[in-house]
Amino acid sequence: QVQLVESGGGLVQPGGSLRLSCVASGTILSINTMGWYRQAPGKERELVAVISSGGNTNYADSVKGRFTISNDNAKNTVDLQMNSLKPEDTAVYYCNAHLRVHTYFGYRDYWGQGAQVTVSS
């Protein structure tokens, strides 16, 4: 059983910063990528940032230069440092891990429960 648990959401004023953290636990053989997605009310879930086990990163254009993703392979964690936050960053942020639990099975996606981030004055 694999669990992804997020922490660090909350309310922040425009221009402020927040840091999201996620830890994957359970029976994990290997992790290909970990990342963050977000979903605002009335909108589809979208990629925010993703990082591979080798450290390669990919960001949505809307967050480049403001958000930084990092990971710790030994601890199965991924963090998202969010700076210069804007009201349009308001959403539920979901942690994602693309991993496999056994050699019998292929890689599949696992999701956290979501963390609310609200940017408002």
Image (cartoon, grey):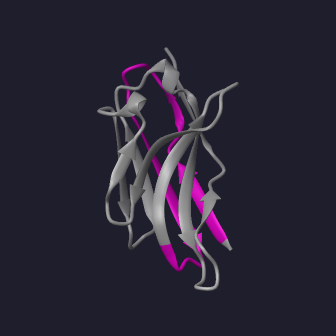
Magenta residues (range): 2-30
User: Which of 114 and 11 lies nearest the eye of the viewer?
Assistant: 114
When asked about the image quadrant of residue 15, the answer is top left
- Where residue 37 sits: x, y (%)? 54, 43
Q: Residue furthest left?
A: 65
User: Looking at the image, which residue is at 63% across and 65% down?
Assistant: 3
Q: Is residue 26 left or right of residue 88?
A: right
Q: Is residue 76 magenta?
A: no
Instruction: Name the main secondary structure of what is drawn in magenta.
Output: strand
Q: Is residue 69 above or below residue 16?
A: below
- Where residue 13 sits: x, y (%)? 44, 21
Q: Is residue 65 above or below residue 35?
A: above
User: Which of 45 and 8 lies nearest the eye of the viewer?
Assistant: 45
User: Looking at the image, which residue is at 66% across and 50% down?
Assistant: 113
Total label count?
0
Q: Is residue 116 above or below residue 98?
A: above
Q: Is residue 21 magenta?
A: yes
Q: Residue furthest top?
A: 121
User: Looking at the image, which residue is at 50% across and 56% down?
Assistant: 22
- Where residue 71 sits: x, y (%)? 37, 59
When asked about the image quadrant of residue 92, the answer is top right
When asked about the image quadrant of residue 96, the answer is bottom right
User: Looking at the image, which residue is at 62% across and 37% down?
Assistant: 45
- Where residue 81 sits: x, y (%)? 37, 42
User: Which of 113 and 109 lies nearest the eye of the viewer?
Assistant: 109
Q: Is residue 8 left or right of residue 62?
A: right
If the image is split into quadrants, where does the N terminus sit?
bottom right
